[in-house]
Amino acid sequence: MKIKNILIGTGVVFATSLALYHTCVIKKGKTFAASLDKSPESLDEAVLYGGKMKDYQNQTMQDTKIGAFFGGMQLDFSEVITDKAAYRMDISIINGGLNIIVPNNFRLKIVDTCKFGGIADHTVCLDPDNSVALSVFADVTCGGLNFENAPE
């Protein structure tokens, strides 16, 4: 009888903690989404419990914020128009994943905080003399972030 009560109590504690964790992540996701630039030319994106694929073909690159909360996205920046020498990308991931495709002339500088997650930079800058700097500030918790060049 004691073991049964211990197992039931453990199950209740686990279910409660899981529900509280999801509630906190949902709140962070909604707060993040509310902070995004909602203008039509903005490149800011967020996903909560879902998936998204976005292609920014022929759009002007700008500083951007990206968030994935219990979901994933693939964002293709390979055909963006650049008018500056440097851009900033702020990324927040909790239990999610991002795949970001950048042009071959982008040079990445990644500053990250990873907790039970990771970042992979598979990019190659083919023209270092005329490169565009992309400073990435990423906070990854239980998720992943991948950067790659567009396939030839």
Image (cartoon, helix red, strand yellow):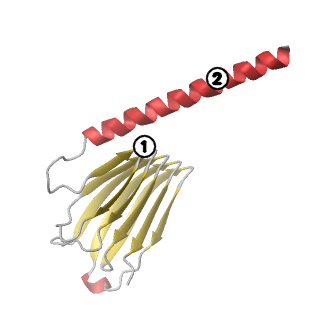
Picture layout, residue 15 above or below residue 135: above
* Left or right for 111, reference 89: right
Indicate whether 79 appears above or below 28. below
Q: Residue furthest top?
A: 1
Left or right of 28 in this view: 142: right
Q: Could you tell me residue 139's position as x and y percent?
A: 43, 50
Tell me the kind of residue under disc 2. Val
Q: How many marks?
A: 2
Determine the secondary structure under disc 1. loop
Q: Residues within 10 Å of mark 1 (few under 14, many from 20)?
A: few
Question: Against 79, is 17 above or below?
Answer: above
Write down the residue under mark 1: 49
**Depth check: 82 or 22 in front?**
22
Q: Nearer the viewer, mark 1 or mark 2?
A: 1
Tell which of 152 and 44 is nearer to you: 152
Q: Position of residue 80 (x, y in %)?
A: 22, 71
Quadrant of the drawing holding the C terminus: bottom left
Q: Residue at 53% across / 28% down in the picture? A: 19
Q: Which residue is denoted by mark 2 in the rendering? A: 13
- Residue 17 x/y as whole percent: 58, 27
Q: Amino acid at mark 1?
A: Tyr
Question: Which of the two residues, 35 or 131, is positioned nearer the viewer here?
Answer: 35
Q: Is residue 57 left or right of residue 70?
A: left
Q: Secondary structure at mark 2?
A: helix
